[in-house]
Image (cartoon, rainbow, N blue to C red):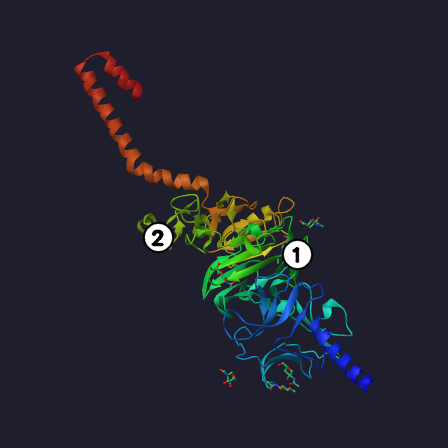
């Protein structure tokens, strides 16, 4: 009898202990009040509330940090209104969140059924569903890292995975105590066939963009480049690009969070000394980072009092509005491109350095072309307005060309990427300008001077009033 009690007790203990460890196995469940902790005690997974609310959410937070820092939420918009929630692996091998033992509030979405499904919280903060028999990390049937909330953890991938049809974007919490997304998101937009550039949106409007990947970083967010604390990786999966950052030193605790309240994408660093998060970097950084602030073909220069300037070869569409600092209409060409006139003379390009590359929604690229071939490619298409190297490593490689208006350019100090903007041929520009000015001013002026001298010569000669005036007139003539 005692043996049986001991056996039952030990079974019971074994079960609770394993639950309190880092996994949920088949036929186990965790109720509100129980949590699982990752192996090294970094993260915790379970039920939590925010502020004074009675609403219960299921999510992952830092266990080792005293300030509640939730990095992922399962039932973001469907809180449970009491403590009757429970998590269990159902008979077809998905993790389900149940309310009062019956209604499914949330579940994982694995289409494959594991023989022995197990849910585990890893020290990276990733909650994974896998087959207990299959230890390979590639074989996750489902992972929370594929469904980010508002936080990007180190090792988490951000971007469009075309192979699996997954778009891992961030969406901010509505408020600090409501993890349901409102309308503020940051991610790669699949409809633009996922050029390595991420867009931040407020509703339907573009709010900020990262700038295109250039081999080292993105020109709009130089703060995300690798440094001594972390590595930045951009990598291709299929034909799409993804971003990830890895810590170089695990003693650092850092997260990237998208916040609806302050409308920022912030890189936060945990300060052991202060026991608080400190902001390492934010985007957008300033007024010039706001998407398209200077309109089409404008350049935002934060150090100027009138921050917006037209690109070389362009003028404000409406001079009056521009002077009143309403930049919204942007800039138009001063002189039309030669290409449009069907002339044989080639257009020219002006080089612009130290800028955030224009929006790549209207672009074409080729990785194996060099800059010279890129220039020719651009010249051969009248819709091409600018070109640049795609990758700035090793003196530059690849070709990126833009069509239509150049949007959202700003001056930045560190870029290393040069943009060549198409303008009408310089000689033609001058030749075009000369007759205009000449016809209006110089020709009549020269004509009247010539006439005056002729008249003078005649009269001066006739009057024989001294040789000096005559000689002078002769010399001038
Ligand atoms: C909680 O939600 C359930 C079902 O969604 C509902 O039946 C119940 O009345 C709610 N309880 C409270 C206290 O709001
Ligand atoms: C288990 O959960 C998944 C996801 O909600 C669902 O599709 C499936 O039908 C559930 N299986 C059973 C037996 O309820
Ligand atoms: C859920 O079911 C278990 C047994 O299946 C039972 O002990 C528990 O009371 C139930 N909880 C609720 C809230 O219905
Ligand atoms: C967003 O930022 C504000 C102000 O910096 C802060 O009070 C709030 O907690 C943040 N919200 C979230 C969801 O982190
Ligand atoms: C990691 O950082 C800690 C504290 O700053 C330092 O003591 C340690 O040497 C670092 N480790 C590595 C591998 O750089
Ligand atoms: C890219 O450029 C290379 C070299 O000029 C060329 O061989 C290749 O066909 C181009 N690819 C496309 C898709 O245009
Ligand atoms: C120029 O580029 C545009 C956009 O890619 C394309 O639609 C058009 O066919 C190109 N024209 C020529 C002449 O290559």
Circle 1 — which element?
Answer: strand
Q: Position of residue 327 (x, y in %)?
A: 37, 52
Residue at 63% over, 47% down: 393
Q: Quadrant of residue 204?
A: bottom left
Q: Is residue 118 visible?
A: no
Mark 2 crowd level (few <14, some 14–19, many ≥20, 10 Å Cα) = some
Residue at 57% over, 62% down: 67
Q: Of the residues under marks 2 and 1, which one precedes in the sequence? A: 1
Q: Is residue 74 left or right of residue 312?
A: right
Extreme residue toward the left, this view? 463
Q: Position of residue 94 (x, y in %)?
A: 66, 79
Mark 1 crowd level (few <14, some 14–19, many ≥20, 10 Å Cα) = some
Quadrant containing the N terminus is: bottom right
Name the residue nearer the viewer: 65 or 326: 65
Disc 2 within 8 angstroms of ligand 4 (CB): no
Circle 2 — which element?
Answer: loop
Question: Label 2 belongs to which residue?
Answer: 326
Question: Label 1 belongs to which residue?
Answer: 246
């Amino acid at each position: 009898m005692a043996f049986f009690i001991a056996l039952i007790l030990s079974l019971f203990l074994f079960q609770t202990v394993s639950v309190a460890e880092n996994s949920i196995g088949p036929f186990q469940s965790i109720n509100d009040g129980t949590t699982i902790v990752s192996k090294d005690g970094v993260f915790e997974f379970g039920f939590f509330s925010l502020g004074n609310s009675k609403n219960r959410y299921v999510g992952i937070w830092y266990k080792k940090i005293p300030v509640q820092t939730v990095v992922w939420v399962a039932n973001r918009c469907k809180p449970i209104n009491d403590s009757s929630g429970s998590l269990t692996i159902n008979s077809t091998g998905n993790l389900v969140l149940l309310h009062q033992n019956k209604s499914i509030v949330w579940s994982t979405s694995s289409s494959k059924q594991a023989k022995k499904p197990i849910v585990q919280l890893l020290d990276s903060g990733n909650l994974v569903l896998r087959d207990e028999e299959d230890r390979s990390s590639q074989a996750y049937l489902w992972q929370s890292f594929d469904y980010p909330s508002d936080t990007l953890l180190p090792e988490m991938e951000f971007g469009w995975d075309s192979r699996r049809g997954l778009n891992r974007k961030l969406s901010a919490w509505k408020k600090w105590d409501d993890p349901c997304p409102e309308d503020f998101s940051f991610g790669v937009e699949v409809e633009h066939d996922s050029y390595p550039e991420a867009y931040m949106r407020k509703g339907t409007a573009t709010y900020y963009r990262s700038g295109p990947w250039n081999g080292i970083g993105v020109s709009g967010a130089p703060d995300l480049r690798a440094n001594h604390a972390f590595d930045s990786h951009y990598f291709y999966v299929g034909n799409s690009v993804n971003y990830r950052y890895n810590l170089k030193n695990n003693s650092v605790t850092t997260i990237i969070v998208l916040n609806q309240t302050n409308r920022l994408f912030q890189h936060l660093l945990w300060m052991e000394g202060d026991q608080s998060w400190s902001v390492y970097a934010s985007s957008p950084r300033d007024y010039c980072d706001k998407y398209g602030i200077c309109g089409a073909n404008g350049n935002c220069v934060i150090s100027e009092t009138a921050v917006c300037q037209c690109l070389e070869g362009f003028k404000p569409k409406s001079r009056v509005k521009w002077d009143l600092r309403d930049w919204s209409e942007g800039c138009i060409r001063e002189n039309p491109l030669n290409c449009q006139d069907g002339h044989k003379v080639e257009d020219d390009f002006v080089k612009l350095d130290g800028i955030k590359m224009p929006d790549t929604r209207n672009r074409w690229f080729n990785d194996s072309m060099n800059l010279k071939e890129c220039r020719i490619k651009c010249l051969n298409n009248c819709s091409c307005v600018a070109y640049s190297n795609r990758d700035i490593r090793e003196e530059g490689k690849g070709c990126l060309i833009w069509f239509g208006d150049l949007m959202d350019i700003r001056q930045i100090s560190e870029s290393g990427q040069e943009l060549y903007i198409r303008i009408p041929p310089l000689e033609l520009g001058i030749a075009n300008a000369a007759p205009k000015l000449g016809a209006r001013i110089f020709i009549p002026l020269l004509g009247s001077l010539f006439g005056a001298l002729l008249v003078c010569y005649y009269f001066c000669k006739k009057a024989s009033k001294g040789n000096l005036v005559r000689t002078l007139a002769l010399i001038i003539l």
